[in-house]
Image (cartoon, rainbow, N blue to C red):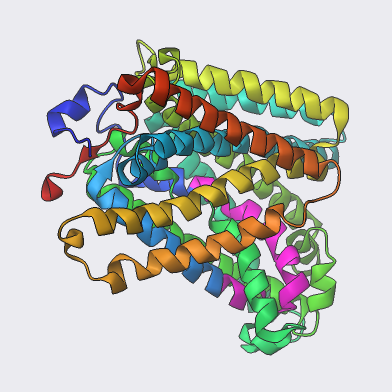
Amino acid sequence: MTSSSSEGIRQLGLREGSISFWGALAISFGNMAPAASVLFLPQAMAQFTGSAVPLAFVFAMVASFLTAASILHFARRFASAGAAYAFNSLAFGKVLGFLSGWMLALAYGLALPSNLLVFGYFAQGFTQQVFGEQISWLIFSLCGIVAVTYLVIRGIRTSARVDLFLIIVETAIVLGLAIAIIVQGGANGNTWAVFSPYQSPSSWTGIIFGMLYGVGAFAGFEASATVAEETKNRFKAIPAAIFAALILGGLLYIVVSYAIAIGYGVHGGGRLAHATLPLSSLAIHFVGQWMALVVDFAGMISALGISLASANASARVLFTMGRDGVIPRWFSHLHQRFGTPHHAALMLTGVSTLLLFVVSFAKSPYPAGFSYLVEASDILGLSLYVLINIAWIRLWKKDQHHFHMGWLVGTLPSALGAIVMFIPLVSTIYPIPAWPLNLVLYLTALFVLTGVIVALWLKKNRPETLTQAGQASVSSEYL
């Protein structure tokens, strides 16, 4: 296990103490994209849950906390901008640690172009409705990537402040609409019935399947671990930020999904399941046409927020791997003025811009282009959630005193978390989807296989380099 003192941390390059708990919270909550989640997920969940979407979100919150338990255990003890890259290196060894970083960089990285597609799509529609101007979505997406790249290079403090502002605005909009629906009593009055599993066509089975979709709304909650080296009081602030993101996100999803459910009515689960943008439809019905435009604006800035948060996370994973020498050290170069991983950021910008242009020639930005990129990101992300749960169990067993925790606290949540994340992972890859989503699956598998080959090559030809993989600072409490 590699560790370093607080003095060693200052030599790692990234600027220590750049952000506080609030900045770390912005990175985690921004990666969850709260407004986008309540815009796009409830109707997908309602296919299984009927009007009991809020109940499924309750279980999704609990399920997310199971995986969060493993990450919280790591974050309280170890800090690295590589996050799962470092955590899994400590538990499994350098080969699987390298592969984790390889996958994590792309999982976060793909969130940049995929959500810029959504941003461009919403911005195009918003501009046309408000100003009567028809401007290509690609123009908005390219403007978005320029803004994101500037902010990432400008510094994590600036990025976190922008993300926090966007989160406050988008949350205020969707929560305000939810309160308006609840105050008016929805379609048939306020009721606890939407928390009953019997509103689902298949009872508890439907709630469980809805929960698996709902877990996607919490994806990215762990992203603040990538800014640990730049956070004040990192061993307390990062776990607190992850915990707070899950609590705040969970409460928001439950309240807003409750408003959506009663807005369609207890027996309106079927109509909800077939709605395109149910929150926008409810905005028109309960407030007015102008509110639907405001909701679309919330979705637009939510997509921009997750693009910024994920770009910061991916750039830091690439930076850390470059610093360790397991990928070209070019990625570890820091901006002379801002001290940020600008080479990694520029690489992300280049690849993302290429993907945006490919989508512009091949498919519509949303939902087609978005779904292709998200499928790859989901496969990688869910695989890493499974791995990090197993990693914590392995590290707990390796520690002589099991970190002074019994199995009930130390391993049971992690084991359940691995199972919960494994189920949607399997459903994503099997049965194999039809063309062209099957091509995305094959390309993702090829990317992972390439990572395995590179890791084994390093082990054979540059073992001294691979031994540097996944270094992390250790809390003085556990030294």
Figure quadrant of residue 13: top left
Percent coordinates x, y for residue 308 in the rendering: 54, 34
**At x 37% / y 52%, what residue is drawn?**
391
Give 384 or 128, whichever is nearer the viewer. 384
Percent coordinates x, y for residue 264 in the rendering: 78, 76
Magenta stretch containing residue 42, yes or no?
A: yes
Magenta stretch containing residue 158, yes or no?
A: no
Camera sees residue 161: no
- Which segment did they paint magenta? 30-58
By secondary structure, the bulk of the magenta-drawn segment is best described as helix
Give 422 or 251, whichever is nearer the viewer. 422
**At x 13% / y 28%, what residue is drawn?**
7
The answer to whether 366 appears left or right of 196 in the picture is right
**At x 54% / y 23%, what residue is drawn?**
149
**At x 20% / y 25%, what residue is drawn?**
10
Percent coordinates x, y for residue 407 in the rendering: 28, 70
| Quadrant (top left/top right/bottom left/bottom right) for the C terminus | top left
Camera sees residue 387: yes
